[in-house]
Image (spheres, rainbow, N blue to C red):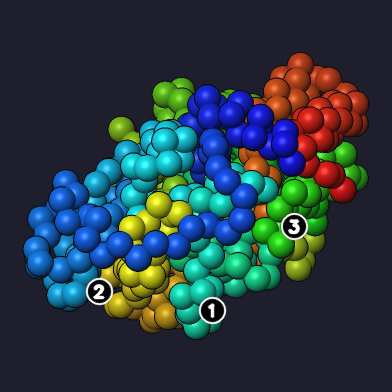
Amino acid sequence: MKKLSKLLTVLVSATMVMGVSGCGQPGAPSGGSSGSAAVHTDTKANDDAKCRNTVKYPKAEKVTLWSWYPQVGKLIDHFNESHKDVQVCWTSGDQSAKAYSRFNTAIKAKSGAADIVQLEYAVMPQFASGVEKHLVDLTQFGANKIKNDYTPGSWKDVQLGGDKGVYGVPVDVGPVVMYYRKDIFDKYGVNVPTTWAEYEQAGRELKAKGYQGHIGNWQPNGTLFNYAYYAQKGAQVFKYSANDPEKVGINFNSSEVKDVVSFWQKLAKDDIVSTDDTDTAEWNKKNVDGSYATIIHASWMVGYLSGLSGVQDGSHWQVAKAPVWKEGDPAINCGGSALAVTDQAKDTKLAAKVAMDFFADDGAQQIAVNDSGLYPTWKKKLNDPEFMNRREKFFDDQKINEIVAPVAKAYTGYQFVPFQTYANDEQTKTLSAILRDGKDVGGELDALQKTLTDYAKQQGFTTE
């Protein structure tokens, strides 16, 4: 595993991009030591911590937190109000790119990290792989006792593909659904698709009847979205388990992946779909002006779409299930995050308790859903009649949780590799060549498979 240190040094400089295009593209850690993540018991180390929030009970022990959740200050105040024995001290609100860079710097320096950090599921293996043990296994502090409070997929995500450790407490997920312009489908007399075959047919019908836009968009830079599409077809392009952290699996040249990419290449070649990069000003404009008849996206597109400049309330958008290849296809997800305890936590046991309790009560979950716009991992909230029956004004008062919540419940988890940024970048190059330049699907995916397999081996991983 000597070369793993090289991998981690190389990836320190990787650029992190948090955005709509990929549900967040994870960076990677640097430095580290072998063995399990360290456990500490210093109850006074945070006494002088500089908090961005007002501490309600100054004499209580402090636990530091890095997080960029919307309204995190309100969530912290809620927690601190009801916990006289411990107070959360919010020390950084940097978003994912800067937050991960800050964490990398602290890992290298062996000091400076918060006790608890918000991490996207896709980045977690990179802080806990091989020699990297910077996330505390929470099972030693009773994490398995709360397992049944969470959806199976979100819990699997924080187990990092294994079945022994738990490296974070799930907070939110991004169930994938279809947003569609009802007015466009109505105007041209085209049925809203429920399968990918119907999606293609609807796209061709819209074009034939004079619609000047595209039924949708397939983005080469979609990273995690594109992995979700493969998963829906039954492909698992990555395998990684915290049980065996020196081995990875890569499978980009399976027949399932080739089928998915070939499908979208055909639609792009026939101008049925566009191939615009997401998270750009042009993409935002097209989301508003009717250039796309559908957007296949995660649940948090609800807030993003309604907040775009020029969009109107009571608009023509509706939510439906994402198209499937066949009945029974797996539910797919893009994004989501957890609260993880770092190996630099001053009082590890207390930090673990805070991470597990932070969103545990009804009040915190209400703030998370209503004010922060998080899509919940908590079974209780997902089964709450008030949550399920809530109407969204932007979607013409549709009860969208009737569509989205079943996807969140059915999601079974995903696996990512410890060099996810590199894999994301290489996939983007490959898909761009296929979709925009018309390159051969099989040849390009075979080449991507070789590139990622060779890279993994160069960094000291064994591959399967």
Q: Which residue is mark 3?
A: 244
> Could you tell which of marks 2 and 3 lies nearer the N-terminus?
3
The residue nearer to you, when weighing 225 against 238, is 238
- Three-letter code, disc 3: Asp
What's the CA distance linking mark 2 and mark 3? 39 Å
> Could you tell which of marks 3 and 1 lies nearer the N-terminus?
1
The residue nearer to you, when weighing 8 against 456, is 8
- Three-letter code, disc 2: Gly
Dot 1 falls on a residue whose secondary structure is helix
- The 10 Å Cα crowd at callout 1, few under 14, some 14 to 19, many 20 or more, is some
Residue in the picture at 19% in, 49% down: 49
Q: State which mark lies toward you, 2 or 1.
A: 1
Dot 2 falls on a residue whose secondary structure is helix
- Three-letter code, disc 1: Asn
Q: Which residue is mark 1?
A: 144
The residue nearer to you, when weighing 213 against 380, is 380
